[in-house]
């Protein structure tokens, strides 16, 4: 489908992209404003960025969020991949419908509902077992639950498209099922695992609602700190922090997608060479 | 198997026994971890919410009464308090906020569709290399923080924001427009946040569209707009449905947007639930609100999605 786009299509594309990007660019612009008043341009300054480095509340929250993000995305990739293998490879087992439902449900469940129900579970568990204490542990457990859903769906589509003949050939040659899977199918679905990890990491890093419900006193993640600051009014250091996060995450995603695309192209080239 | 014979008969037997066990039960090692995890930490919590929605508020930790009490002589007493549900139906705040949420989500979905459809169509019709770049541009905001993007929108629409400053400077208006803390701001926020969710599924269906059908319609003398209405639009219905659901579903339970951009009258159900929980500390009523929300809105949507995806597969 390649022909000249009508001016109407081009202009809506431009408007749509402008809608998506102008606010972010304006935010980044404001973050270099020397004036503490948001409406007055007081000259260029990196003052608010250096102020961030001395703000212990923000640094602590960022460190907590990063630690949660790493644990959550690793856990979610393991559970999500297992769930995807189960759903794609085993067509019949008891609980298949249940697993399908639970994998898809977090995507349609409002976060406020998930958050409140999980908190009620944690409170009940605390009364019976004396575990888990609300804070790092509960946030990690809650985040893994919804991130697993996203990983499963990412890996599932990749696994559906993966050619099983290689794995069967490996098994014919005497490899056990686990070995055959690890040596043949795992490299093919590896990009999906990587993007699942990255997706879980950004989702966990961004989550405000579920964390607010299940967290306890003293454990404030970065979104929780930002939200309370924004609620109180405009503070210019939030501009700097927000610009920093958006730029770092954006750069990482661009870099990752570039790497994945190159790896993918190489793999396609390799298979073409092999087929020749 | 040639290796096994050199290992001695007992070991070989053990090995085959283990192999047999794995063949028969090995799949449960894969199925059970995610199944149990989601069961315990995702599904069972709803049972707790249901239980607590029948409790009463109490000044203690946690702030509700037990509905199940066991006296020392094993006399079990179950107290179900339907007051919370009755309260939901008598206090009109809840009814209004359910309606307001549906209305807001519905109209923002329509606007997203009107803006997203031409965008997806434009991307689908551009060359392969441009397509990759455009898709990346659309997807990138989806990866960057949702909360921060809503905050960024404040910088445009607040009284001293870019839009008002520009309009004042141009002399179009003489007093700043009040956009922040209005319903309009909530609509803008939802459209801005969820536009990529509309564009991507639409693009996926439009890209797969069989071009020869359009050519055939053109050859038979159909004007472009007729071709669009008769061929393109009906064929892209799966994409329209998928995109609309992806916008409508998260929009309806939205908390961040009405709370950061909306005014006191933007009573979306997510926000009401949050306030009930954190400000009134009324956990039983908050549980009841989420149960009703689930039964009235999320359940039907999930069922609809389940059956429509089944139909697509068939």
Image: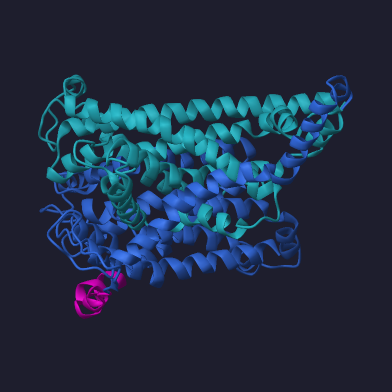
Chain colours: A cyan, B blue
Quadrant location of the N terminus of chain B?
top right
Depth check: give the residue in front, A51 or A219.
A219
Depth check: give the residue in front, A23 or B39.
B39
Residue B254: which quarter of the image? bottom left
- Compared to residue A245, the image places residue B87 above or below, namely below
Residue A67: which quarter of the image? top left
- Compared to residue B307, the image places residue A1 above or below, namely above
Residue A180 location, x and y as percent? 75, 31
* Residue bounds of the magenta highlight: B80-99
Q: Is residue B257 left or right of residue A92?
A: left
- What's the residue at 75%, 25% (across, down)? A269
- What's the residue at 39%, 42% (across, down)? A141
- What's the residue at 22%, 42% (across, down)? A227
Q: Is residue A139 visible?
A: yes
Residue A153 location, x and y as percent? 56, 47
Q: Is residue B222 left or right of residue B112?
A: right
Quadrant location of the C terminus of chain B?
bottom right
Magenta segment, prevailing SS (helix, strand or loop)? helix
Residue B58 belongs to the span the image colors magenta: no
Q: Is residue B268 visible?
A: no
Depth check: give the residue in front, A211 or B263.
A211
Q: Is residue A206 left or right of residue A33?
A: right
Residue B23 location, x and y as percent? 75, 42
Residue B81 location, x and y as percent? 25, 75
- Compared to residue B281, the image places residue A238 above or below, namely above
- What's the residue at 29%, 47% (across, down)? A126
């Amino acid at each position: 489908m390649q022909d000249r786009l009508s001016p109407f299509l081009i202009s809506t594309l431009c408007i749509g992209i402008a809608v998506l990007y102008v606010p972010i660019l304006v935010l980044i612009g404001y973050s270099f404003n020397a004036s503490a008043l948001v409406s007055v341009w007081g000259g260029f300054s990196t003052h608010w960025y250096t102020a961030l480095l001395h703000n212990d509340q923000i640094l602590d929250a960022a460190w907590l969020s990063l630690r949660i993000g790493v644990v959550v995305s690793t856990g979610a990739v393991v559970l999500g991949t297992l769930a995807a293998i189960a759903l794609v490879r085993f067509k019949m087992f008891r609980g298949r419908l249940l697993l399908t439902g639970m994998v898809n449900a977090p995507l349609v469940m409002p976060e406020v509902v998930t958050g409140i129900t999980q908190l009620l579970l944690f409170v009940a568990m605390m009364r019976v077992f004396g575990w888990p204490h609300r804070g790092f542990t509960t946030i990690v457990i809650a985040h893994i639950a919804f991130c697993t859903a996203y990983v499963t769906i990412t890996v599932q589509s990749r696994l559906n498209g993966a050619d099983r003949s290689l794995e069967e050939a490996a098994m014919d040659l005497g490899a056990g099922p686990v070995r055959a899977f690890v040596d043949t199918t795992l490299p093919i679905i590896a990009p999906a695992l990587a993007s699942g990890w990255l997706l879980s990491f950004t989702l966990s890093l961004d989550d405000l609602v579920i964390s607010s419900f299940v967290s306890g006193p003293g454990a404030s993640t970065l979104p929780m700190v930002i939200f309370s600051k924004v609620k109180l009014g405009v503070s210019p250091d939030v501009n700097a922090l927000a610009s920093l996060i958006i730029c770092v995450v954006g750069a990482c995603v661009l870099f990752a997608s570039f790497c994945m695309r190159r790896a993918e192209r190489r793999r396609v080239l390799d298979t073409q060479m092999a087929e020749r | 198997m040639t290796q096994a014979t050199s290992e001695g008969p007992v070991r070989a037997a053990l090995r085959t026994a283990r192999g047999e066990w794995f063949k028969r039960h090995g799949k449960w090692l894969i199925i059970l971890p995610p199944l149990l995890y989601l069961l315990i930490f995702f599904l069972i919590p709803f049972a707790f919410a249901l239980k607590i929605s029948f409790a009463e508020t109490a000044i203690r930790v946690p702030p509700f009464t037990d509905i199940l009490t066991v006296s020392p002589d094993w006399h079990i007493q179950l107290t179900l308090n339907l007051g919370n549900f009755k309260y939901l139906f008598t206090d009109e705040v809840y009814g209004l906020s359910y309606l307001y949420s549906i209305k807001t989500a519905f109209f923002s979905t329509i606007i997203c569709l009107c803006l997203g459809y031409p965008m997806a169509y434009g991307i689908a019709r551009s060359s392969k290399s441009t397509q990759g770049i455009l898709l990346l541009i659309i997807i990138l905001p989806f990866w960057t923080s949702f909360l921060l993007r809503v905050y960024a929108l404040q910088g445009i629409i607040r009284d001293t924001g870019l839009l008002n400053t520009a309009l004042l400077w141009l002399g179009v208006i003489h007093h700043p427009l009040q956009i922040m803390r209005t319903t309009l701001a909530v609509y803008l926020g939802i459209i801005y946040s969820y536009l990529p969710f509309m564009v991507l599924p639409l693009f996926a269906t439009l890209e797969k569209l069989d071009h020869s059908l359009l050519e055939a319609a053109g050859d038979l003398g159909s004007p472009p707009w007729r071709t669009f209405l008769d061929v393109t639009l009906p064929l892209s219905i799966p994409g329209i449905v998928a995109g609309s659901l992806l916008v409508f579903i998260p929009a309806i339970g939205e908390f961040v947007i009405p709370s950061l951009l909306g005014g006191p009258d933007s009573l979306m159900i997510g926000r009401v639930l949050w306030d009930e929980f954190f400000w009134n500390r009324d956990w039983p009523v908050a549980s009841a609100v989420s149960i009703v929300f689930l039964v009235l809105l999320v359940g039907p949507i999930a069922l609809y999605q389940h059956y429509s995806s089944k139909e697509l597969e068939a």
